[in-house]
Amino acid sequence: MTRTRTPGISRRSTLALMGAGAMSVAAPWVARAQAKTIKIGMPTILSGRVAQLGTSSRNAVMLEVEKVNAAGGLAGRQIEMVVRDSKGQPQEAARVARELVNTDGCELLLDGEASSGSFAVHEVARDLGVLCIHTCSEASSLTADPKQHIPNAFRCVRQGIHDSIVGGSYAASIAKAKGLKKWATCSPDYAYGRDTTGEFTLYLKRFAPDVEVISESWPKLFQPDYTEVVTKILQAKPQALYSCLWGGDLTSYIDQANIYAMFSQMEVFAVNMADYTALTVVKNLPKGIHSGNRYIKTFPTTPENAAWGDAYKAKYNEYPTNWSWQNATAVMFLSEAAKKANSTDGKKIAEVLKGLTIKCPFGADGTVTMRGDDHTLVGYAIGWGTTIPQEPYVPEVKAGDWKTIFELEAEWKKSKGYT
Amino acid sequence: MDLDALAGCLASSACLVTQTTSGLIIGMLLFLVAVGLTLIFGVLKVVNFSHGAFYMFGAYFAMTAYQLTGSFALAMLAGAAGTAILGLIFERVFMSRVYGADVLMQLLVCYAFVLIFDDVVRIIWGPEFKSMGMPSAFQVMPLFIAGGVVPPYYLLLIGVALLAAIVLGIGLSRSRIGKVIRAAAHNPGMVSALGINTGLIYGGVFALGGMLAGLAGALAAPVRSLTPGMGFSVLIESFIVTVIGGMGSILGALIGALLLGLIRSFGSLGFPLFTEGLMYLFMVIVLVSKPTGLFGKEAA
């Protein structure tokens, strides 16, 4: 039996027409709903030894995004965060960043990468022209070096040179008081480690000219074993050690140095120690390690900072990290800039971000500024103190002076040919 | 390059003791991982690319047992026994299906499980790094031998690894099981024809290899941070040890691991920016002069 076609409109055609009709009626409504949402892409490290920092970055962003959305969103558009794991690998960070913009439709980027990945994401931002706020990389050259500069990238992070000026002057005062002339360094072998260590020793020697660095160690990032590094430092017999190891690398290093009784043989200055990530993970935290503040809820000693730390803990059942406050601040900047620009357009936000000062729980005077000439964060609370093995971990932090930081940073930039 | 520092160290008994001990620690941990790798290759003819995962599991099992019981001995036992059981299951359920298959297929299966095992650890223990902490018995001042610094925990670590090497060496050369394993490595068909269950032998060898890697992970747990994927860097170094020593040679694994440990330890003084490179350079020199490795045998 053969089937014959009947003339007129078939059932399939009728269904197709009905579908098209429904779509045409719904399309403007769907488009309006989509327009209300703005996607922000965030490549960060969600696996591997520093995953805790990446996770804490995401947590802090979500905490702030909830507030922004509850208050009406970014210039009226609800924020949808799209967070992806870069595994801490530069090539993966670049791939993820590109995909977030090109495939996922993200209009802005929060680059939650360590320095190893941030330079790669920076190049993606340069290529795609999308507004990018670096939220974790402290390598000074990222925004200080004019060759790296692009108008659409900002850095909402503490910066190595700032830490080094404050840390160098703090360490020099201890060195003079205790006669610490022979120093060793042990820092990770990549941009952040090299930059920060060089800058720290520069200012240490500036404030204490008779200091001499007698040994340098450059373990690779995420190295599992530091035994050979620890013994090398012990052989050199320094009176003091500087390290900018961080995260799991720092805790491994401390665990391994502990059993060599290293902390009783020299003064240790570990800039990244005073962060809950390290403070709470190290089982036998030595007393008296000198550290810069990373994130501790007791510095700056303001109710706003303590409240923010407690709110984070209440939501995520752990304390925030150094990366948390920086990411939270980036969302605060975005929110304020979008409000002032009355737009979510990246170019317009970038224009407003330049030189923008906002109220912030992490500011030295309750505010922070996105400096206009080099697109970097200034005015955040910065200081050094010594550890104790229980809360508050760093009971007294000696605050750095931003006037001195600005003066010496300007000199440093000149010496590097950046200005 | 800082040859003065290296020469100064070689002329100082204190430095020699400290750096030699440091080299032995690195070497013995590597040996425990590499010997399992070489044993599995020697008997099963499989390059077990997933071997680093057993090191990782050993560390996590030990940490969990230590947190639950507070006993360091139980932690070590959990690390070793847990990975032995895991190795046996892994071999019986998955690896036994790719014996005799193309090497590429074996590598793909192993690599797939590297990723799966990392994700399993991430799901169970979380993605952030962990620290087991040093047991209180070892939170003591280091020993000073001839002016050199030697932590008591590292003496234990070297002792346990050395004991494992001796037991393994004697067990394989003298015991009946050892002879059967060696026979199975040489001619599995003949061993099977004699009525011996080769599947059991293969499973046992895989479990033993896993156990040794797990023991290494457990011993490393008090001093290294634990994270998903931590087995990978150890695996690479273990491969280098295995290749230097000669694939399938237990003595080769021991000598290769110790040499590598000492190269790293003394190399960090003389060649601080080329310590990693020294390792690879040494491998190249060995393979160019003896392609089968130091104790490897020419294929018949």
Image (tube, coloured by chain):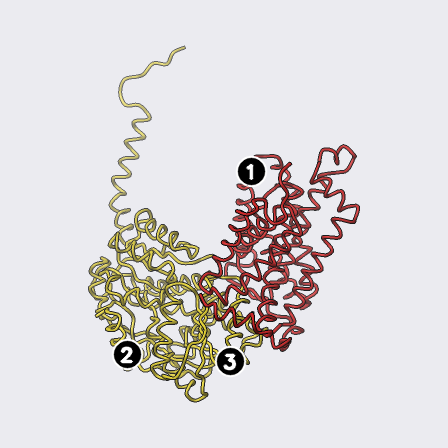
Q: Are marks 3 and 1 on the same chain?
A: no
Determine the colour of chain B.
red
- Residue type marked 2: Leu
Q: Nearer the viewer, residue B94 or A368?
A: B94
Q: Is circle 3 on the same chain as circle 2?
A: yes
Q: Which residue is mark 1?
A: B103
Q: Relative to B259, is B146 above or below? A: below
Q: Which residue corresponds to the image point at 59% horizontal and 70% vertical from the top-left?
A: B16
Distance of mark 3 from mark 2, alpha carbons? 28 Å
Whether residue A142 sits left or right of residue B245 in the image: it is left
x and y, in percent, of residue B1 in the image: 44, 65
Helix, strand or loop status at disc 2: helix
* Among the 4 quarters of the image, the one containing residue B200: top right
Q: Colour of chain A?
A: yellow
Q: Which mark is residue A110?
A: none
Look at the numbered disc 1 and give the secondary structure of its residue.
helix
Q: Is residue A392 visible?
A: no
Question: Which residue, given by chain and number where applicable, does mark 3 sit on?
Answer: A266
Near-viewer residue (A353 or B3): B3
In primary-sequence order, the first of circles 3 and 2 is 3
Residue A295 drawn at (x, y percent): 42, 73
Residue A43 in view: yes
Image marks 3 and 2: residues in contact by CB distance under 8 Å: no
Badge 1 sits on which subunit?
A: B
Q: Amino acid at mark 1?
A: Val
Disc marking residue A408: 2
Marks 1/2 in contact by CB < 8 Å: the verdict is: no
Judged left or right of residue B112, residue A361 is left
Q: Secondary structure at mark 3?
A: loop
- Residue type at mark 3? Met
Displayed quadrant of residue A412:
bottom left
